[in-house]
Amino acid sequence: MGKKEMDTKKPYAVVVIVQAIYAGMFLLSKAAFDSGMNNFVFVFYRQAAATIFLAPLAFYFEWKTAPSLSFATLCKIFLISLLGITACLDIYGVALVYTSATLAAATTNCLPVITFFLAVLLRMEKLRLRTTPGLAKLAGVIVCLGGAATLAFYKGPHIKLWCHHILLHGHHNINRPSHPSSGMIWVKGCFLMLSSNFCWSLWLVLQGRIIKSYPSKLMLTTLQCFMSSIQSLVIAIPLVRDPTQWKLDWNIRLLAVAYCGMVVTGLTYYLQAWVIEKRGPVFLAMSTPLALIITILFSAFVLCEKLTFGSILGGVLLVGGLYSVLWGKSREQMLDQGNCKPPEVDQECSEFKQEEASHKSPDILV
């Protein structure tokens, strides 16, 4: 009985660890940029560290079982690496310089919503507007848009908390804009952060198709990290010509590179795969707001970031929209499987079946 309870609680403990790791990524990345590290150099070092960490594992576990890699598949992997990793991380780095770790964690909550929207556009998902789950997903998208707009355009009163600046002692940010409180700079940062999430969502959607032709997940991840490290190096060299910007000393910069490259890319890959296998992707996605909560607390007390009412309100709206979309998706999956239990969902199940029958032609596919 005790062992069974432990097995039941393990997924909950693992998702907390995963989200804490992501919160650490937001905080350490921001701390590295605030200490003066160039974001383009950071992306190169991060992806190089991830490649070095994953390559031995990929060769050991999947080299003999991996399918042959065709030239067409290699080109596809190169393109999704450029779009979903290199461009995503470079844009994310610039956005983080302009904004805050809290905003980065908050906008991550709209990732499943953007992914769903892209899946609808690519005709991989259906938006059934005559059913309760379909309306819940649509409402979630609208609420997420409201949350993103709130983060970008409304700050409200500041919330002052006690903090101790332990990560950036003796450093300053040479990348930070001269007027970080400027409204236009903040809006620009919000737009870039959402653009980064858009690239990430598109990568998730497109990667699902590539996995069908190349199912060796660990080898695929390693290939993408390797290609991304080459791409990010090509981008960084002409943009960062100061040799001192490429130096890695025993400080927060090296810690952030090692953490994001090895722990985030390596450890969370395994942990997320384990959670999805045990409890499914919806369970993992529903834990995303934990990263926001952890980041808010640590960014306020450790990085001394000023919290605003607008940031908290925008984060709440994003989380609400996320749960609305996830609830609609999980309910549709239940109804698709025929798990109708009267009287609670009897009418809903009937409406769903009628909608399915009428969707031979009028399916709402944006």
Image (tube, helix red, strand yellow):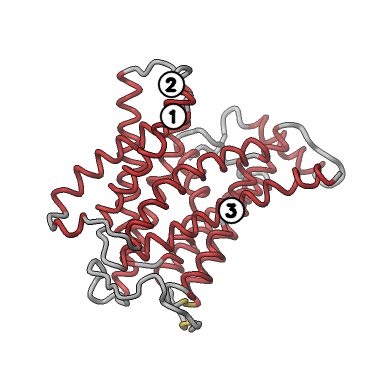
Marks 1 and 2 sit apart, C-alpha to C-alpha, by: 7 Å
Question: Image quadrant for the N terminus?
Answer: top right
What amino acid is found at the position of numbered circle 1 in the picture?
Ala
Nearer to us in this view, 298 or 135 = 298
What amino acid is found at the position of numbered circle 2 in the picture?
Trp
Which secondary structure, mark 3? helix
* Badge 1 vs badge 2, beta-carbon distance below 8 Å: yes
Nearer to us in this view, 200 or 128 = 200
| Mark sitting earlier along the chain (1/3) | 3
The answer to whether 179 is drawn above or below residue 263 in the figure is: below
Which secondary structure, mark 2? loop
Image coordinates of residue 365 in percent, x first then y, are 51, 37
| Mark sitting earlier along the chain (2/3) | 3
Answer with left or right where residue 28 lies relative to residue 301: left
Image coordinates of residue 36 in percent, x first then y, are 26, 66
* Badge 1 vs badge 3, beta-carbon distance below 8 Å: no
Residue under pointer 2: 63
Question: Label 2: few (<14), some or many (≥20) within 10 Å?
Answer: some
Answer with left or right where residue 252 lies relative to residue 139: left
Residue under pointer 3: 17
Marks 2 and 3 sit apart, C-alpha to C-alpha, by: 29 Å
Q: Which mark is residue 58?
A: 1
Question: Label 1: few (<14), some or many (≥20) within 10 Å?
Answer: many
| Mark sitting earlier along the chain (1/2) | 1
What amino acid is found at the position of numbered circle 3 in the picture?
Ile
Residue at position x 72%, y 34% in the image: 353
- Hey, which quadrant is residue 166 in on the image? bottom left
Image coordinates of residue 97 in percent, x first then y, are 31, 64
Marks 1 and 3 sit apart, C-alpha to C-alpha, by: 23 Å
